[in-house]
Image: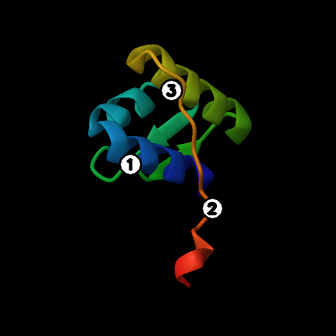
Amino acid sequence: ELLSDTIMEMRERVGDDALAIASHIDGLKIDSATGRVIDLTEHPSKIIATLVAEYEKLFGKKVSFSFRRDTNNI
């Protein structure tokens, strides 16, 4: 789920380029239309690290994620 969330977060920021990047990560198979993870053949932490490194390399800046929800509006 964390991998799918990471891909979706990047897709919101940069569009479908995020899916293209994710589709070329060794050990990760995604649905090309939705970005959802279909299969993993490598350890998830290795895939996340590689995915974030590729995003940073291709977009030329650090990538940071915050998956915490804002509880002020709840």
Q: Position of residue 40 (x, y in %)?
A: 60, 42
- How busy is the neighbourhood of tag 1: few (under 14 within 10 Å), some, or many (20 plus)? many
Q: Is residue 71 left or right of residue 55?
A: right
Q: Which mark is residue 25?
A: 3
Q: Position of residue 39 (x, y in %)?
A: 54, 46
Q: Position of residue 37 (x, y in %)?
A: 49, 50
List the residue tagged with mark 1: 35
Q: Earlier in the sequence, mark 2 or mark 1?
A: 1
Q: Which mark is residue 47?
A: none
The total number of labels drawn is: 3
How far apart in space, not on screen, are marks 1 and 3 (Cα)?
13 Å
How far apart in space, not on screen, are marks 2 and 1 (Cα)?
21 Å
Q: Position of residue 25 (x, y in %)?
A: 50, 26
Q: Which mark is residue 68?
A: 2
Q: Quadrant of the C terminus?
A: bottom right
Q: In terms of depth relative to the viewer, which is nearer, 65 or 58?
A: 65
Q: Secondary structure at mark 3?
A: loop
Q: Secondary structure at mark 1?
A: loop
Quarter holding residue 24: top left
Mark 2 and mark 3 in contact? Answer it, CB < 8 Å: no
Q: Amino acid at mark 2?
A: Arg
Q: In terms of depth relative to the viewer, which is nearer, 72 or 16?
A: 72
Q: In terms of depth relative to the viewer, which is nearer, 8 or 47?
A: 8
Q: Is residue 54 above or below residue 70?
A: above
Q: Nearer the viewer, mark 2 or mark 1?
A: 2
Q: Amino acid at mark 1?
A: Gly
Q: In terms of depth relative to the viewer, which is nearer, 35 or 40?
A: 35
Q: Amino acid at mark 3?
A: Ile
Q: Residue at the location (30% across, 31% down)?
A: 17
How far apart in space, not on screen, are marks 2 and 3 (Cα)?
26 Å
Q: Residue at the location (54% across, 24% down)?
A: 62
